[in-house]
Amino acid sequence: RADFATLMASAAVPVNRAESKAQSSAESTLQSSEPTRRRPCACIVLGMAGSGKTTLMQRLNAYLHERQTPYYLVNLDPAVLDTPFGANIDIRDTVNYREVMRQYSLGPNGGILTALNLFATRFGEVTKLIESRASNLRYVLLDTPGQIEIFTWSASGTIISESLASIMPTAIVYVVDTPRSANAVTFMSNMLYACSILYKSKLPLILVFNKTDVCPHDFAVEWMTNLEAFQAALQAEKSYMGSLATSMALMLEEFYANLTVAGVSALTGDGLSHFFEALDAAAGEFERTEAVEKQRQCKQQAEVEAQRQASASERFKADRFEDAGAKVVLDGSQDERQDGAAQALSSNLGILGEDEDEDED
């Protein structure tokens, strides 16, 4: 927290542009000369309210601390009264949730959303702080608000996830309440939400079944791999939702094929070793796929920018010809426009010569 507050204060100090440019070029040269270091993996923990996200963060904190693995904890929930873990960066140190509600006359959900949006405007300072510690970190864990839609479907959630993905491998951890998902329809609802998060974020997703100390997640794995077993469980649902879930199960088969699943218990710590193995695998997947996708996007943006500059250049030439008195033919060739401009300039020079002869007379 002290590092983040110091960095926030230093962000307001003006910096000489020439010195900044020289420093950035020197840093880029130094980074290119050094061997490539392993970047830390960012883990964004999402889940429905009551699924055990914060408790899981506490257990991850204890697990990594016990094994002396370097990590960073970020709390993005502005409305939480107390966290069972010590966050290195806490949104509550920057944004006062209750003051936001009072000033903007908002309710609880609107206050959380506005506070997260305000924090997202300064998230670049957070990424700078994480980058400065990246050489000594292995994981960056982020706890999100209990209202999952506030982070998932808001602009601030997109800004935060894309900012992290631009500097390090990033994975989404979707926490599922295993005892509640024992109902087939509830299970299907969780799977559909996880599917929507995957395709919206375009980041590797790990499906974590929490509270396995209460209810093992074996039934969920069987439903994901055996369609007939899931359809048999849906037979008890004699309703429209049961029929709808049966038809959607066919669509989710492809989603299940490439999905990483881990069962953990935030209370006892069971399954955490398998969870971090899955997280490391997701980081490797990010390096393989997201890097290629980023190169493709950069190439596409460069082509769009080249077309924009060419179009702007053509419009500039047309404006110059039109100022000279030429008749601009939008669908004509460039030679026609140049000939028209030359004739217009010649006529203008002739008029100027006649005016000078009249003045002499």
Image: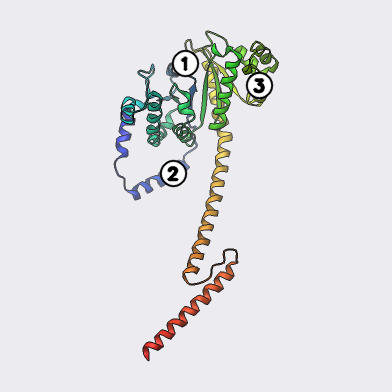
- Tell me the CA gap for discs 2 and 1: 45 Å
How far across and how far down the image is residue 185, in percent?
Answer: 60, 16
Identify the image quadrant of the N terminus.
Answer: top left
- Residue drawn at point x = 44 percent, y = 28 percent: 137
Report if the CB atoms under discs 2 and 1 are less than 8 Å apart.
no
- Tell me the CA gap for discs 2 and 3: 49 Å
Report if the CB atoms under discs 2 and 3 are less than 8 Å apart.
no
How far across and how far down the image is residue 207, in percent?
Answer: 56, 21
Residue 50 is marked as 1
Check disc 1 and report its element: helix, strand or loop.
loop
- Residue drawn at point x = 63 percent, y = 12 percent: 237
Residue 249 is marked as 3
Amino acid carrying label 3: it is Ala
- Local crowd at mark 3 within 10 Å, few (<14), some, or many (≥20)? many
Using the image, determine if residue 143 lies above or below residue 300. above
- Out of 247 and 151, give the one closest to the viewer: 247
Which residue position holds label 2? 28
The answer to whether residue 199 is visible is yes
- Residue drawn at point x = 45 percent, y = 23 percent: 147
Check disc 3 and report its element: helix, strand or loop.
helix
- Out of 347 and 51, give the one closest to the viewer: 347
Residue 30 is marked as none
Check disc 2 and report its element: helix, strand or loop.
helix
